[in-house]
């Protein structure tokens, strides 16, 4: 019997797969199935809901996607404040029912059916992508959790298909307590590096003057026996023209306006469940500074993209196709793998597109094709 060595590329891929499988898991994310429920009083509508749960060790966050969808399908949805909410660790703060609204040239980019809502990486750096394809632009939210951290990172990518006249990201929060819902007055405050904006006031700040904000309520403070704690925000200033803070008697609105050429925003978001205002106020400036530095250095690509060896896999695939026994055993799967690999070629080519659609297509097939790598290796071993 003649023993043949596996190609170097296959050996490298095998080692990389083992290393990836044994990576420690300080933080994880799980994306639940879509649920569909008939809207009460509206037999023509379904409420579609999906939730991703980030377990970071110190706190658990959830990101939800919810919209009212006509049973017969339609291009536009009923999304209310926004389809993307943050229901955990508490409903208060960044609103559980919809806290982020992307607006390009005056139109909401998330008011069309979502294309995908999936985990791009489950561990050790849990990452979830939400992608929309609007006539005006492709849009992606990439939420990233880090083990031991008490907040979530968010990268917003916008790839316009039209001339950009304006692009804003609007955020909605109800710090500590749903005051208006309970018909009780509060005292909203927004603490920034340069000024504290009081309820009823409005403030436009340059990005270096307003890059962080702690949103809290002086009436509903956990040390007084009520209130679910402040929430926080960091905006990495690159590409930002101004940040507008507007604390009203009920919601607090934050509007991030970008420069005309800006295509990416990076944020850090916190909820401080049941934490006293004084503690959060004392800790937040240092926490915000650390988050700003992390955002500036962030490589947002999931591990599957960062570590993918396109050339090595291409070589391994050609090696497998040249062996009749392998082709006989798993020929159709080899064909599927090659089709997917060629569709993703541009993502890894020098100077090729690394855009929203290309990464979405790559990640959609990655887990399935990762299993296929093991089948290629096993078939090769049996072919010795």
Image: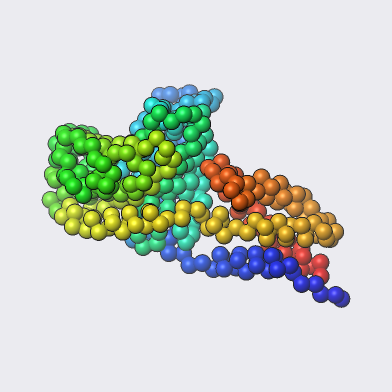
Q: Is 197 drawn above or below residue 293 in the view shown?
A: above
**Which quadrant is home to the N terminus?**
bottom right
Residue 277 rendering spot, x and y as whole percentages: 17, 52
Instruction: Return the residue nearer the eye: 12 or 217.
Output: 12
Residue 323, compared with residue 71, is above or below; it is: below
Comparing 157 with 260, the one in front is: 260
Q: Position of residue 191 (x, y in %)?
A: 19, 47
Residue at x 69%, y 47% (from the top left corner): 342
The image shows residue 60 at horizontal and vertical percentages of 36, 55
In the displayed image of the protein, which residue is found farthest to the right?
1
Identify the image quadrant of residue 215: top left
Q: Is residue 101 visible?
A: no
Left or right, 204 with reference to 267: left
Question: To which quarter of the image does residue 51 belong?
Answer: top left
Tell me: 305 left or right of 227.
right
Please identify the quadrant where the C terminus is shown: bottom right
Q: How many marks?
A: 0
Image-based side of 194 in relation to 33, left or right: left
Here the colouring is rainbow
Q: Is residue 232 above or below residue 74?
A: below
Measured as percent of width and height from the top left, residue 136 is found at: 48, 29
| Drawn side of residue 340 relative to residue 3, left or right | left
Q: Is residue 20 visible?
A: yes
Residue found at x 30% / y 36%: 255
- Residue located at (34% from left, 49% from top): 236
At x 43% / y 24%, what residue is drawn? 42
């Amino acid at each position: 019997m003649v023993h043949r060595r596996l190609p170097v590329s296959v050996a490298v891929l095998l080692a990389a797969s083992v290393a990836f499988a044994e990576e420690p898991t300080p933080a994880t994310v799980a994306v639940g199935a879509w649920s569909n429920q008939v809207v009460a009083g509206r037999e023509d509508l379904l409420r579609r809901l999906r939730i991703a749960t980030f377990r970071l060790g110190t706190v658990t966050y959830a990101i939800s996607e919810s919209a009212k969808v006509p049973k017969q399908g339609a291009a536009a949805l009923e999304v209310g404040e926004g389809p993307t909410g943050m229901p955990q660790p508490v409903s208060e703060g960044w609103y559980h029912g919809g806290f982020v609204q992307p607006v390009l040239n005056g139109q909401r980019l998330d008011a069309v059916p979502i294309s995908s809502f999936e985990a791009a990486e489950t561990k050790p750096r849990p990452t979830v992508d939400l992608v929309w394809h609007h006539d005006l632009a492709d849009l992606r939210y990439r939420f990233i959790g880090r083990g031991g951290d008490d907040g979530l990172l968010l990268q917003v990518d916008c790839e316009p298909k039209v001339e950009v006249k304006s692009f804003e990201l609007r955020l909605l929060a109800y710090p500590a307590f749903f005051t208006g819902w309970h018909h009780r007055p509060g005292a909203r405050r927004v603490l920034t590096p340069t000024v504290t904006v009081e309820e009823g006031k409005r403030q436009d700040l340059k990005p270096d003057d307003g890059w962080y904000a702690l949103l809290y309520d002086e009436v509903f403070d956990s040390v007084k026996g009520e209130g679910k704690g402040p929430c926080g925000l960091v905006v990495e200033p690159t590409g930002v023209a101004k940040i507008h803070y507007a604390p009203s008697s009920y919601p607090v609105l934050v509007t991030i306006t970008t420069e005309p050429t800006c295509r990416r925003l990076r944020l850090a978001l916190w909820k401080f469940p049941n934490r006293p205002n004084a503690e959060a106020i004392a800790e937040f400036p240092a926490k915000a500074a650390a988050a700003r530095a992390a955002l500036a250095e962030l490589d947002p690509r999931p591990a599957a993209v960062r570590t993918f060896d396109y050339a090595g896999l291409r070589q391994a695939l050609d090696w497998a196709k040249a062996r009749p026994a392998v082709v006989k055993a798993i020929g159709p799967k080899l064909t599927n793998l090659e089709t997917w690999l060629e569709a993703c070629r541009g993502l890894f080519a020098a100077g090729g597109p690394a855009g929203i659609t290309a990464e979405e297509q790559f990640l959609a097939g990655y887990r399935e094709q990762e299993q296929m790598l093991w089948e290629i290796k096993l078939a090769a071993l049996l072919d010795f």
